[in-house]
Structure formats: structure tokens, C-alpha cells
Image: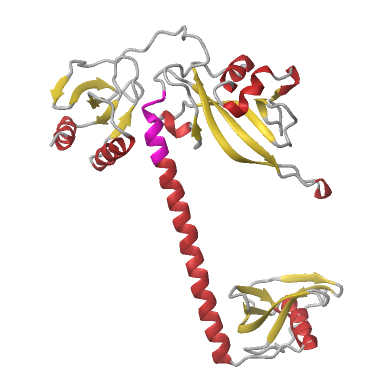
Amino acid sequence: MNMQNTEAKMYIGQPLVFGDMANPQKAGWIVEISPETGRVFTIGAGGMTKQVWRVSIVWEDSTLSKVGDEIASPWIEKAAILGVEAKGADEVAELQAIALEAQERQRQQVAKEREDREQEISDWRDSIRAKVPADAKAVIVAEFEKNESDSMTDYFATSTSKTVILAFSRNTRDMFPEMRKAARNYEQTAYLADAESDAEHREKYSMGAGYYLKASHHYSDGWKISKRRITGPSDDPAAYIPFGEWSVPDGAPFVSGPSNKATPKTDGDSHAKDAGGFTIEEHMHTKRHFQMWVVSPKERASREVFSMWLEKAKERKGWYSRKWGNTPAGFAFKCPEEAQTFADELTK
């Protein structure tokens, strides 16, 4: 094992070229050299070599990287052969500042795109929350899958380019008749309603894809229909529904028949108190067993108005509660004064 601690034969502004001699990809310059603090090794033709120096590089495309001296050495040799000129310390410092600014802009752009996406999903869930049936336990979803496999590297995977919400179910059992019926709710998946029996995939085993309806094998381009639970620790069923296009028929959201189970009843005073365009009712939370006051609008609101109401409710530590048994859908609060103030604010 070669562990010689050779002195650094590098300097600030020294050029490097990333890529092979036949296809050099980009030039760069050293902006900083510091001792390697950890026990880092590289393996090459000469065996295992300990990294002595850490080299910071600014590239001509305004990107930055840090590598060990053993990695940087062949890049330096390529730059010498290709005749890439060195730069002064001030010049590479300026290039580094430009690269850092570009890096920060990219970071801010990624953060903004992530925040915009999260807001889009939140707004979408606010818009569908009132549409989710009170006694639904599962949602049936269509996804267009694109094959991302590479047989040369033995890599197999798919990506989802589009998601469509088709229907709801009162049970959580995987039933292909439900999936076939739901397929008719969207023009591009309607053909799966009459697909051959081999479109019914039963892969509930390790590395399998579960139960799903698809006219081809798992790693292929095409529409896949599956069923997902919308029940869990959260009281909000919309939290379990994937973001996508809504294609649930109005007035006929279910693909299964009526549930055989009795609708659970809530305790507490169910007498509604009039509050302008709203009613306020006291009910018992059936899962966590605490009293809550539900503010229900007398008329259905637009998406924009609903979002505004929800935001105001959250400011008062309220939340949206779907209809369940004798409990109406509305904005719930643990404090009656907060419920009344919330209703008063919206009726001004």
C-alpha cells in the first residue's frame, strides 16, 4: 500500500481539464488547496494511495467541485498537454465568486420550485376535500407509467408521468371488477374495462408491484389502475389521495355497492346554532374523544373562497373535518369561542 505524503505540486490558478484526451469536456482552475483532514484513499494501478490534499476547482461553466489530489493530478496533466493557460489568484477568485452566485441562484430556484409544488398540491387537496365521500375507505387511481429500464445495465424501473383520480370504494379489498368499472370514468383508460384476463396482475410478493390492472407487463409504457387506502392516522382523507387530475363522476363517486356496516354515530349536542351564512354544531371527535365545534357553510363555496376560509381556520388552530355519521362537514375547532369568532369574521 502506497502511503507516501508527497508535497503538493499544485498552485492557485493552475489549470485542469476534465475528460479524456480524445474528448476533453471542460477546463477549470484551482482556487484553493488544503490538507485532507480525513483518512481518504484512492485505488489505482499503483495500489491504495492516501489522499494528502483537498483541491477546490472552479470550472469554466461556473460550477465548483472539491476532489483529492490523486484525482486532480491527471486533470492537471491533460491541461498541460493541451496548453491551457494558468490564471492569476485574483482572476480565479472572481470566477469562484461568479460560480458561488450561480450556485446560490440555482439553490433558490430549486427551493422556489419545491415551495410552488407543495402549494399547488395543498391547494389541490383543499379543492377536492369536500368532494371525498364521507364513507370512502379507498380511492382508485390511474397512472401512466413510462418504462425507464436499461437492460444493458440490468436496471428496471418505471416513472409516472400522469395521475388521474377515477373513483372511490367503501372497502379496501383489491377487486378487479371495481378497477375495470372505474376505468370507464376516463377516456384514455376506458379500454382497460374490457381488457383480457392477463391484464389483472397479482403481484403481492417481495419485489412485486401489488394488485393492478394493466394491459402489459409492469416494466412497460401504459396505463395502470390500482386501489389505495385513504384511511390512516390523519383525519384528512385528502392527505392520502395522490395529486393528479380529477375524473370522478359527479353524483356517482363509488364503484362498489353500499357498505354493510352501520354508520357510526357521534355523541354530544347536535343542535345547530345559526351564525349568518353558517351553522355551528357541537360534536364529539369519534377517534380521539374530545369535544369540537363544527362551523358549516350553508352554501357551497368556490375553490378560492374555500381556500381563504381554510387559511383563516388554520390561523385559529382549526381544521377542515369531513362529514362522518351525524357530524357535518365543516371547519372544526376545540374552542367554541374560536368557532364563533371564525363564523363572525366570515359573515362580515
- Whole-percent x and y of residue 12? 62, 89
Q: Is residue 55 left or right of residue 309?
A: right
Q: Which residues are magenta?
A: 123-132
**Most frequent secondary structure within the magenta stretch:** helix
Tell me the quadrant of the picture where the N terminus can be found.
Answer: bottom right
- Whole-percent x and y of residue 56? 62, 78
Task: Check residue 137 for magenta coloring.
Answer: no
For residue 41, above or below residue 172: below
Tell me the quadrant of the picture where the C terminus can be found.
Answer: top left
Extreme-front residue of the structure: 187
Q: Is residue 79 left or right of residue 268?
A: right
Q: Is residue 40 left or right of residue 234?
A: right
Q: Quadrant of residue 250?
A: top left
- Whole-percent x and y of residue 16? 71, 82
Q: Nearer the viewer, residue 236 or 251?
A: 251
For residue 114, above or below residue 161: below
Residue at 83% across / 75% down in the picture? 22
